[in-house]
Image (tube, rainbow, N blue to C red):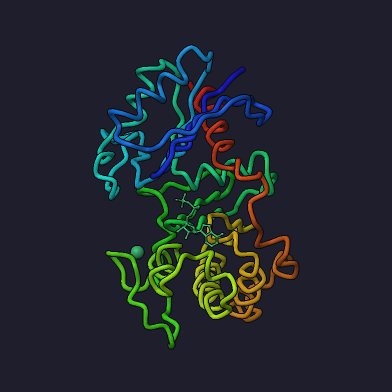
Amino acid sequence: MKYGALEAGGTKMVCAIGTEQGKILDRISLPTETPEKTLPSIIDYFKGAGISALGIACFGPVDLDRQSPSYGCITTTPKLAWRNCNIVKILGEALQVPVGFDTDVNGSMLGEATWGCAQGLDTAIYITIGTGVGVGVLANGKLLHGMLHPEGGHILLSRHPEDTYAGKCPYHANCLEGMAAGPAIEARWGKKAWELADCPQVWELESYYIAQALANYILILSPQKIILGGGVMHQEQLMPLIRKKTLDLLNGYVDAKQLQDPEHYIVLPSLDDNQGILGAVKLAMNAEAES
Ligand code: ADP
Ligand code: ZN
């Protein structure tokens, strides 16, 4: 059986054909332009490929409520051309296959839970720290949606006493994304994030904010594993700082065996950057099973 997978991002659309064993048979990447330009190219790629379902792991916010008239839409995105685009309806009608749909980060979470380092776990989180910050949540074996879907990138944090940077988020003065996503690092320090690799104070501050977020996620969701992806996590010095500061903040209060082995608890993604597209394959498999 072949499944279509679409990892829909703000800058590129990765389209792939995968199998139920988690093997990617083929893939292409298209720039994210307007729906009028980009969706026909996506349809062309999948048409005739013999897929039995399509999974879409999509940038957001998105409407995941199947009872809602706008189910399948990208909603209040700052990418105005995509606002209110019903990507599920358009691709489903064009390809005539069942469509599975979720956020990009829930997709990555699902990829890791199905074929990666979160296999066998029922509660885990996947966080991406890149152009923005997003959090995918697997809770009791299901991807968490709730009233909309979690927006864990925008949780509010305590400002570091010496940090004078105003924050990059237009909605919140001191949320995780506004203080710690790639663009915030670059605006605070005036250089590209990777050009700051040799500046320890940058990564001390970065880990100060990320650790606060992780401590909060641990206290609220009790994840059995925390996976940290996204471009900013390419900085190898970050992970040890994040692990240490997270444990320091919890201060011994959470008495779980996982926290005694932080190297296996707070981890990088395990699927060679295929976690998102593989999650989309699994979304397609689920959609087919439900159809
Ligand atoms: P996106 O979030 O757009 O899908 P990425 O996860 O690659 O893409 O995130 C891009 C952001 O990550 C940029 O803002 C950039 O500053 C940051 N970034 C990319 N590579 C690195 C790196 N090697 N070190 C630190 N930051 C990086
Ligand atoms: Zn915010």
> In which image quadrant can residue 226 be found?
bottom right
Quadrant assignment for the N terminus: top right
Q: In the rendered view, would you say 71 is above or below 242? A: above
User: Residue 256: percent from the left, percent from the top?
Assistant: 69, 68
Q: Classify residue 265 as left or right of residue 180.
A: right
Residue in the picture at 40% in, 37% down = 31
Q: Relative to the observer, which residue lies in front, 191 or 256? A: 191
Residue at the far bottom in the pictured view: 161
- Give above or below for 192 relative to 128: below
Res. 286 visible in picture: no
In this rendering, the count of numbered labels is: 0
Q: Nearer the viewer, residue 141 or 39?
A: 39
Determine whether 205 is above or below 286 in the image. Answer: below
Viewer-nearest residue: 190 or 161 = 190
**Image position, residue 209 (x, y; %):** 49, 73
Q: Is residue 117 left or right of residue 101?
A: right
Residue 167 picture location, percent across and down: 35, 72
Looking at the image, residue 54 sits to the left or right of residue 251; the answer is left
Q: Quadrant of residue 108?
A: top right
Asked which quadrant contains residue 259, the reply is: bottom right
Residue that appears at 66% across and 44% down: 271
Q: Is residue 133 visible?
A: yes
Q: Give coordinates of residue 240: x percent, y percent.
A: 67, 71
Q: Report the side of 170 relative to 182 (left or right).
A: left
